[in-house]
Amino acid sequence: MDVHNISNNNARENDTAFPELREIFYQTNKPGFNIEGFYPDFWWANSPQGGMSQDEYALFIAYGCVLNGGFPGYVWGDAYWGGTHYKTGDPHINGFNRWSAAKMKLLASFILDEGYDYRTLKPASATHLVDNYDEFVALAISEDLQTILGIVPVVTMDRDIIIKDLPIAQKYQLAWWDIENGGWQGQAEVTSNGSGKITLPETPNKKQSWAFSLTVAE
């Protein structure tokens, strides 16, 4: 399988990486690969956007890359490469214990959850959000509009997240995915309005970012 790598230039910030991954997906129907995305604490190369912490932004970039049609690549531990940042002889393996690195595995659990089939999803950040706030909200949706996955970062907690172009009066089961600890919370039924839009309710905790799923209610 061919994979297109966007790496380095334009790959470290959401407002450039996400559109580029979507373009690759739409043109080739194949995933892109942000193999060198955001590196926490790699202070001279990049910095978190939107007021997020190093940990928060790294997680957001990883989830956002997948939802925009690509692979997230690696994001942790690069500050140890070649001793560019830590010059104290700290072993490289310690990079795996910094910047909440263990939380990355929860991304796979979210995407591969048995409650839906990720293979039916296509990037929808640019097509099914009334406003993605300069790429600070990421969304993927199935062609039949039965399944929607997304992420709402901590910096958008006080903004309306509105999903559009859905079937009118369609009932969905909403669940929030805890990207900090794993697991689903705050399940509720939501219904699209007469314009085919859903405004997401508040997340379970405004002090952190949350992923979510919307699946057609049985």
Image (tube, rainbow, N blue to C red):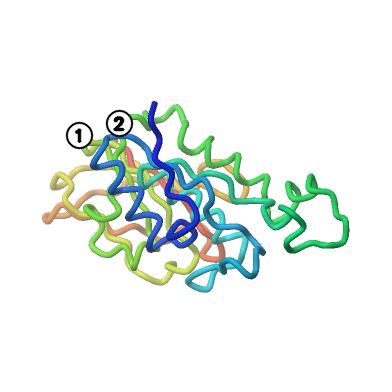
Give the percent coordinates (x, y) of residue 45.
59, 66
With respect to residue 74, does 134 lie above or below? below
Tell me which residue sits at (47%, 31%) in the image.
112
Label 2: which secondary element: helix
Q: Residue furthest front?
A: 82
Please report the residue visible at 39 percent of the width from the left and 41 percent of the height from the top.
Answer: 32
Q: Earlier in the sequence, mark 2 or mark 1?
A: 2
Q: Nearer the viewer, residue 164 or 120?
A: 120
Image quadrant in which you'd find residue 93 = top right
Q: Position of residue 203 (x, y in %)?
A: 46, 58
Q: Do callouts 2 and 1 mark residues in contact (Cβ within 8 Å)? A: yes
Tell me which amino acid carries mark 2. Thr
Secondary structure, mark 1, is: loop
Left or right of 166 on screen, residue 73? right
Taking depth in this image into account, of 8 and 166 the one nearest to the observer is 8
**Residue identified by numbered label 2:** 120
Q: Could you tell me the amino acid type at mark 1? A: Asp
Which residue bears the numbered disc 1? 144
> Around disc 1, counting alpha carbons within 10 Å, would you say few (fewer than 14), some (14 to 19), or many (20 or more)?
few
Is 38 positioned to the left or the right of 165 in the image? right
Spot occupied by residue 63 in the image (x, y as percentages of width and height): 47, 48
Q: Residues within 10 Å of mark 2 (few under 14, many from 20)?
A: some
174 left or right, relative to 72:
left
| 205 relative position to 126: left or right | right
Q: If the image is split into quadrants, where does the C terminus sit?
A: top left
- Frontmost residue, 212 versus 38: 38
The residue sitting at 65% across, 69% down in the picture is: 43
Q: Is residue 25 above or below residue 129?
A: above
Of residue 89 and residue 72, the one placed in the foreground of this image is 89
